[in-house]
Image (cartoon, rainbow, N blue to C red):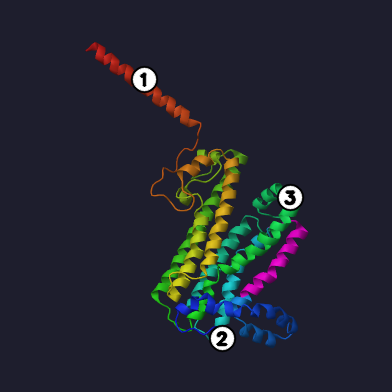
Amino acid sequence: MALPVTETVADCADLARTVLPYVSQLYDLPQQVLQSYNDPAELQKIYLSTNPLVTAFAFSLFVSPIFLLISEINRNYSQVDRLWSILPTIYNAHYVLYAHLTGLPTQRLDNLLAVSVVWSLRLTFNYWRRGGYSIGSEDYRWEILRKRLSPGLLFLFNVTFISFLQNVLLFLITTPAYVMVLASRINDTMAMSDILFARSLMVLILIEFFADQQQWDFQTAKKAYQKTAKVPARLAQEDLDRGFVVTGLWSWCRHPNFAAEQAIWILIYQWGCWTTETMYNWTLLGALSYIFLFQGSTWLTELTTAAKYPEYKEYQQRVAKFIPRLSTSLPGDFSDKKAPVKAEKTEKAETKLSKETKGKRSRK
């Protein structure tokens, strides 16, 4: 059987019951596909008789060497980046398709897929307008690693992390959809809680959209300001001179888009936990891996930004990285150079006040 026998929704999140017994299918799947690649009916039969989690994992393993080959030929390590916004939705669509073909209830899964599609559209659009799909375009962080690592180490890093682990990660963050497929056989009711999960995810995607747009508007205005020396409307010259955005959502935390992105996949994991009535389950591995990836990526991003903009260190001190603080003094002046001036003014004012006080005492 392609799907495990489960008696309760909690069983649907049991690793030993729902995952481990089907690992052996992974070894036979390539040979089965090769023998029937030109027979659509047989391919569909193989698809339905194989556990959907195994099929998804097999696909992630299949595309990894392709990304590796293309990246080494082109000497461009952003191959996975180009499909980052698409692969998770492909995995979620796979689980929904499997549920439809096997006659399982899909209302909850359809909502998850709808959220995933909107997530993909936003991220794909933002990546496109930043030139991510242009020929030769590459994430600047890979260039930094290229300068710091020897060719041999960089190739090893490409094999293990860039082309392999990143693909597996994109598979792992969608594994809550698998437990939802299993749970739909026992509890097929679309409850109010499911609606709240779906709408909360949409709100987080909306936050990402506004954060991206604010960043885009600022960078576009900064480029125009650097060319014409004219300050665009609704922006302050000191903000443009500073070089990085500190207003809007960016005044609440340094990476509002990253914060919302991590929250999305944590919430999807929680949705799976809620559906299976478990406090936690093995699909946490995907959400945790995603958080760890963003921690490392953000560290490298901020290291580069702080080296480029002197005032960024003060921004780091005053504004939280992901979780907003209860209070903030933004927007404001981040110039360290003005601190001595302010101190000097304060000292002069205190001296003047002291003299006036002494004069009044002497007159008395």
Foreground disc of the pair 1, 3: 3
SS class, disc 2: loop
Q: Which residue is mark 2?
A: 102
Q: Where is 227 relative to 72, above or below?
A: above
Residue 109 seen in the figure: no
Region of the chain picked out in magenta, as a range: 56-77
Report the magenta stretch's main SS.
Answer: helix
Tell me the number on the disc at residue 7.
Answer: none
SS class, disc 1: helix
Of marks 1 and 3, which one's residue comes earlier in the chain?
Answer: 3
The amino acid sitting under disc 2 is Thr
Residue 132 seen in the figure: yes
Crowding around mark 1 (Cα neighbors within 10 Å: few <14, some 14 to 19, many 20+) is: few
Alpha carbon of mark 3 to alpha carbon of mark 2: how far?
Answer: 50 Å
Q: Is residue 73 magenta?
A: yes
Q: Which residue is mark 3?
A: 150
Q: Is residue 265 magenta?
A: no
Q: Which quadrant of the figure contains the C terminus?
A: top left
Q: Quadrant of residue 97?
A: bottom right
Of marks 3 and 2, which one's residue comes earlier in the chain?
Answer: 2
The amino acid sitting under disc 3 is Ser
Q: Which quadrant of the figure contains the N terminus?
A: bottom right
Crowding around mark 3 (Cα neighbors within 10 Å: few <14, some 14 to 19, many 20+) is: few
